[in-house]
Amino acid sequence: MPAAAPSAIAALRDRIVRIEQRGRPDSAVLPFGIGEMDRRLPGGGLALGALHEVAGGGGEATHGAAAALFAAGIAARTPGPVLWCLTRPDLFAPALAQAGLPPDRVIFLEAGDERSVLACTEEGLRHGGLGAVVAEVARLSMTASRRLQLAAERSRTLGLALRRWRRPAEAAEFGQPTASMTRWRISVLPSAPLLVPGVGRHRWLVELIRCRAGESADFEMEACDAAGRLAVPADLADRPGAQGRSRLAS
């Protein structure tokens, strides 16, 4: 079977995006500011007014520290306060501040169970006056994610589902279908060695596992800075195609 021309694939993706957005309010995007990543996302960035999923990879599946900082960096680049709904009050506020999200921008909401987290997240997304709403949940059904996606669309608020599990074996649920626009997995990589004793800027393997009307890809990135921005490692910046590898499927 002959391979489809790139222009034909791009036209088909644009058509799918228009079909999926039919009847929805126009939605802006939040670019990462890194061309290799933004080119893989419809519209050139993360869709505002949409739900996105983030989880840790490998041993990060349970505590999800890198995934939480990745979500914090995204939320930090939205205007307005951020509502963070959780059941386990184990966030380290100074680390969130280093990812661009200071404590005075965050409203922490501790709920008794995940059902309450989802209900509060939906109410936060419906509010319309928040920059972003983060929900820490292990389970996310198609019905629950659809409700969050619709609430985000109506208020044009960015929703982030931070998936955290009690046991690594439970992370297999991350492969179940949801209504999220994108799905990300963040794993920790060794930092670049420094010329002097110390620890360099953290590095992450950022996997775009699923992107509706977009393309899956892997990226090696430096962790969020104090403005919530990722960066391409200096030793990869001049290597064509090294900072982003396409994948055919999630």
Image (cartoon, grey):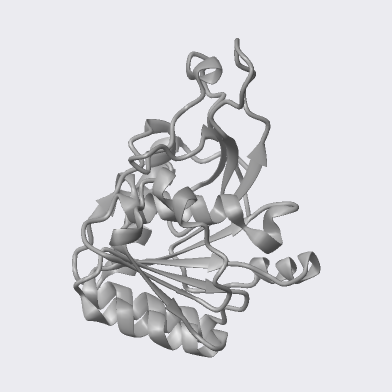
Instruction: Answer with left or right where residue 85 lies relative to residue 246.
Output: left
Q: Is residue 12 visible?
A: no
Q: Residue 141: x percent and y percent? A: 57, 82
Name the foreground residue: 79 vs 49. Answer: 79
Location of residue 185 with respect to 162 vertically, above or below: above
- In the rendered image, which quarter is residue 148 located in? bottom left
Location of residue 80 with respect to 216 vertically, above or below: below
> Quadrant location of the C terminus?
bottom right
> Quadrant location of the N terminus?
top right
Q: Residue 119: x percent and y percent? A: 42, 88
Q: Is residue 158 visible?
A: yes
Q: Residue 241: x percent and y percent? A: 53, 24
Instruction: Answer with left or right where residue 171 lies relative to residue 210.
Output: right
Instruction: Answer with left or right where residue 197 lies relative to residue 240.
Output: right
Q: Residue furthest top?
A: 195
Residue at left 48%, top 13%?
238
Location of residue 192 with respect to 68 vertically, above or below: above
Name the foreground residue: 88 vs 26. Answer: 88
Q: How many marks?
A: 0
Q: Residue furthest right?
A: 169
Residue at left 72%, top 72%?
166
Q: Residue 147: x percent and y percent? A: 40, 84
- In the rendered image, which quarter is residue 228 located in? top left
Residue at left 74%, top 67%?
172
Name the foreground residue: 55 vs 166. Answer: 166
